[in-house]
Amino acid sequence: MAVIVETASKPAEGSGWSERLLAAVTARHATAVAVLLVLALLAFLPGFISLQPIDRDEPRFAQATKQMLESGDFVDIRLQDEARHKKPVGIYWMQATVVAAAEALGVPEARTTIALYRIPSLLGALTTVAITYWAGLCLGLARREAFLAGAFMATSILLGIEARFAKTDAVLTACSVAVMGGLALAYLQRERRLSPGLTFVFWLAMAIALLVKGPITPMIAGLAALVLSIRERSGRWLAALRPGWGLLLVVVIVLGCKVR
């Protein structure tokens, strides 16, 4: 696979400047990821600070987070005087962490600055771009094709919109891509288990997804795993993900956060 990737990354003789540039960018993983993140920032940052809340849900998320900071109650989500439990608490905690850090650093009017509440979404969108590149490599793509997949994600209109909204979807997307990439790698390399680090990331992404938007990501991954298990007439390949301690980790994280 490594030979195929390196060969595919070399420009053909007589190729144009774009081919040579693409080959140079994808010569190393670190360079490819760095260029993808710069491209994503160029796509996501315009209007990030100046745009006023334009989606009806964005000010609701921001206001609920602001009330958390003001009340000190980080369990009971409230919007004005009404309970707001349509979404789990994860995204509110992320926004509250950013705003509290900004206050600690002396940022003026941090609690009423909508851009600060959008930072988790921006980070989620950037993570989505980087993980798309990694997931492409997991699926057997050459480095060049994986880079192009990440670049297409970085310039996606929908992801660009979500990167500018203080809501759940950008963070959920990052978690979902990480989970599906891990699932694909487990299936393609089912003769051996994933490394402990990759397994931890897989189950951590699953736990964060549950805390951000409930069962959406587990349902997506579960359906994919079911279909693949039916195709293989066995679910033994899922052992590569170490489901025993992985599920325990998810339960501990989710229940631990609920208790808090």
Image (cartoon, helix red, strand yellow):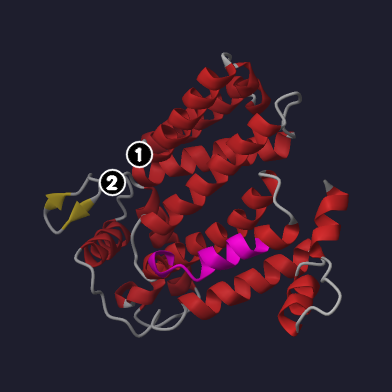
Q: Could you say whether the residue bearing mark 1 is in a helix, strand or loop?
A: loop
Q: Dot 2: within a 10 Å radius of its alpha carbon, few (fewer than 14), some, or many (20 or more) residues? A: some
Q: Is residue 93 above or below residue 22?
A: above
Residue 152: quarter of image = bottom right
Residue 142: quarter of image = bottom right
Q: Is residue 258 above or below residue 151?
A: above
For this rendering, which residue is in front, 244 or 252? 244
**Residue occupying the point 38% across, 34% down:** 259
Task: Residue type at mark 1: give it.
Answer: Gly
| Residue 257 visible in the displayed image | yes
**Residue occupying the point 20% across, 49% down:** 84
**Residue occupying the point 70% across, 51% down:** 141
Where residue 66 sits: x, y (%)? 28, 64
Q: Is residue 145 magenta?
A: no
Bounds of the magenta span? 147-159
Task: Residue type at mark 2: give it.
Answer: Lys
**Residue occupying the point 42% across, 67% down:** 163
Q: Is residue 153 magenta?
A: yes
Q: Dot 1: within a 10 Å radius of its alpha carbon, few (fewer than 14), some, or many (20 or more) residues? A: some
Q: Could you say whether the residue bearing mark 2 is in a helix, strand or loop?
A: loop
Where residue 69 sits: x, y (%)? 32, 61
Residue ID for mark 2? 87
For this rendering, which residue is in front, 158 or 21? 21
Q: Quick check: marks 1 and 2 in contact, CB under 8 Å?
A: yes
Farthest residue toward the front? 14
For this rendering, which residue is in front, 18 or 245? 18
Q: Is 42 situated left or right of 66 in this image?
A: right
Residue ID for mark 1? 214
Q: Is residue 14 above or below residue 207?
A: below
